[in-house]
Amino acid sequence: MVEIKGFEDLGVNECVDATSKLYNEIAVQAQQLVDESYQAVGKKPAFPIDINLIAHHLGIGIQRENLNPGGTTTFNKKLAVTTATDEAVSIVVDSSVSYKTRRYAVANGVGRYLLSVSKSMLKYAYAIPLIPQSLEEIAADSIAVFLLLPVTLFKEEFLRYLNECRECPLDVDVWLTHLSDISQITPFNLAIGYQQMKQVLCYQRQMEFAKYGYDITKMPADPYDKIFS
């Protein structure tokens, strides 16, 4: 057998642990923002998350315009433009794209604003599907995912789906199609976020184990135990 030790030297497990901790912090803050936004209008969060409600809670105006007049000569299509000044914050969304895409474009704009809320000036254009040139766009994507897919709602929906599912083993493609439809997130963007969601839930599970000295016999019953392998 050929010995390959390079991967062990990369400290992959430690890096995954660090990124999972960060995603968890993003997810927790996103959940708080969703809850606060809905509570402000006397509603309870439910799928699909009303991203415009969250934007308005933050004082962000939403407009729809044709951002690609006459088509485009590039592979990327401009989906939204987020602008922030001392006077106002706005997200202009392309009116020609699908409902799911518009929702995610707004969520990405909210994420970008939250990453730059202390700056006096911001102007940012969001476009897909090519690889972004800025890591800030990837960071904004992480916030967008957890705003549209709050951890608590995800767990509830996954558990309900498993309880009603009559097929074993689970067809992951069918489940993800269902999740895309009920959350109204495009498959492209859901693919980005699902891995992050797995990291967060696994991280939370491990932190819960740690509280009880990794002794499963001391763990209280978890109503969501079924969603974990």
Image (cartoon, rainbow, N blue to C red):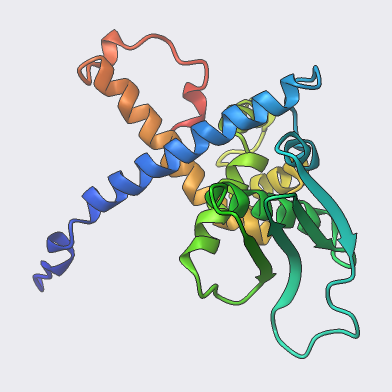
The C terminus lies in quadrant = top left
- Residue 175, given in percent of the width and then of the height, sits at 65, 44
Q: Residue at x 74, y 52 (%)?
A: 106
Please name the residue shown 75% across and 40% down the image: 59
Residue at figure coordinates x 38%, y 9% from the top left? 220
Image quarter of residue 11: bottom left
Q: In terms of depth relative to the viewer, which is nearer, 78 or 223? A: 78
Give residue 199's position: percent from left, percent from top. Answer: 42, 43
* Residue 187: image location, x then y, percent: 68, 57
Residue 99 lies left or right of residue 1; in this view the side is right
* Viewer can see residue 54: yes
In percent of width and height, residue 107 lies at 69, 49
State the count of labels.
Answer: 0
- Above or below, 83 against 77 in this view is above
**Residue, far front:** 86
Report the residue that reaches farthest toward the bottom.
73
Vertical comparison of 10 with 26: above or below: below
Q: Is residue 57 above or below residue 62?
A: above
Q: With 13 as the anchor, is 144 left or right in this view?
A: right
Question: Would residue 229 be seen by someone viewing this image from the given angle?
Answer: no
